[in-house]
Image (tube, rainbow, N blue to C red):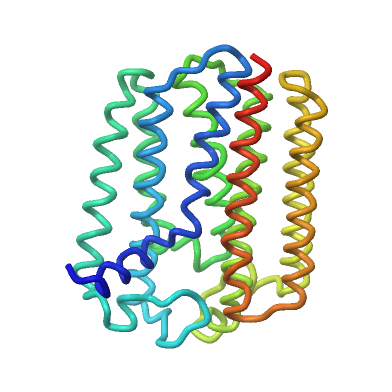
Amino acid sequence: MNKAKLKCWIEAMRLRTLPVSAAGVITAAGCAIADSTFRLLPVVLCLIFATLAQIASNFANEYYDYVGGLDRKGREGPRRGVTEGDISPKAMLAATYVTLGTACIIGLTLLTFSGWWLLPVGIAVAIGAVAYSTGPYPLSHHGLGEVAVIAFFGLVPVCCTYMLQGGQFGLPIAGMALAIGLMGANVLIINNYRDVDDDRSVGKHTLAVKLGPTAMRLLYLFNSLAAIGLIMTWIGKVNATGLSVTCGIYGAGAIAVVVMMGRLKGRQLTPLLGATAMLMLFFSIAWTALAATNS
């Protein structure tokens, strides 16, 4: 594979968004450290599974949007290799299911830490990876993409990774999982906010198309503040000052992104997508570091 072709495949992975899948697992590791149940191996396996599942979903999104006529050349977002003719549809379809299949194999190894309750969850994740873009009711086409992100990048990875380390499900971990899901939804908000004109023109009814730009900026801000509120319920588990500073940095970054959303348009918004994902990753790493230093 030459460098140009490799670059196209790397672009299709959407590297700017991959911190979203890592953040949930890292956060769960921090929660387990805070509760003295941390186990490294299931965390590593969950991280590999989550990353592969997200890459498979990104591949599926590119393939099925092309097949459905929802992409056009020169769109505002990142270059779409299939639409632009850089990658064949057949190759993208194969890559989607090979990547997803590999993720499922990794997922099966996690059964040794959990029991069979994890199997339906894994099946739901695999289905969700493609149901986001295709099927009888594609979630991304009906304004449900953000809901899917909250579920599959927040609730599922945080709760499952925590429980696979021996933690018990309850309101505290559910609250942290929801907080991470809301942070992840903000990444999709930026993506759909940027692509709103392209999506509207092809009849793709994302939440940004349904609600409009002002509502999406307010939703981004609400998600950020709600996430901080949920996170602060863990203040008794780690250093209070450290957690307050961490949440303050995250909140300031989120507010800065909202301000820039009102000033930028089209492709100018792409860096904000990466910034939102990195804010999420920053929180997850800082939270885990706080838990480790407090244990």
> Where is 14 relative to 118, above or below?
below
Image coords of residue 141 (percent x, y): 50, 68
In this view of the protein, which residue sits in the foreground, 155 or 24? 24
Residue at 57%, 79% in the rendered image: 267
Image coords of residue 273 (percent x, y): 59, 63
> Where is 182 relative to 15, above or below?
above
Image coords of residue 118 (percent x, y): 38, 27
Residue at 53%, 29% in the rendered image: 159
Is 194 displayed left or right of 51 in the figure? right
Q: Quadrant of the C terminus?
A: top right
In this view of the protein, which residue sits in the foreground, 120 or 276? 276
Q: Quadrant of the N terminus?
A: bottom left
Residue at 48%, 83% in the rendered image: 75
> Where is 63 relative to 290, above or below?
below
Is 208 displayed left or right of 18 in the figure? right
Residue at 37%, 60% in the rendered image: 13
Give the total of numbered labels.
0
In this view of the protein, which residue sits in the foreground, 124 or 77? 77
> Where is 258 relative to 53, above or below?
below
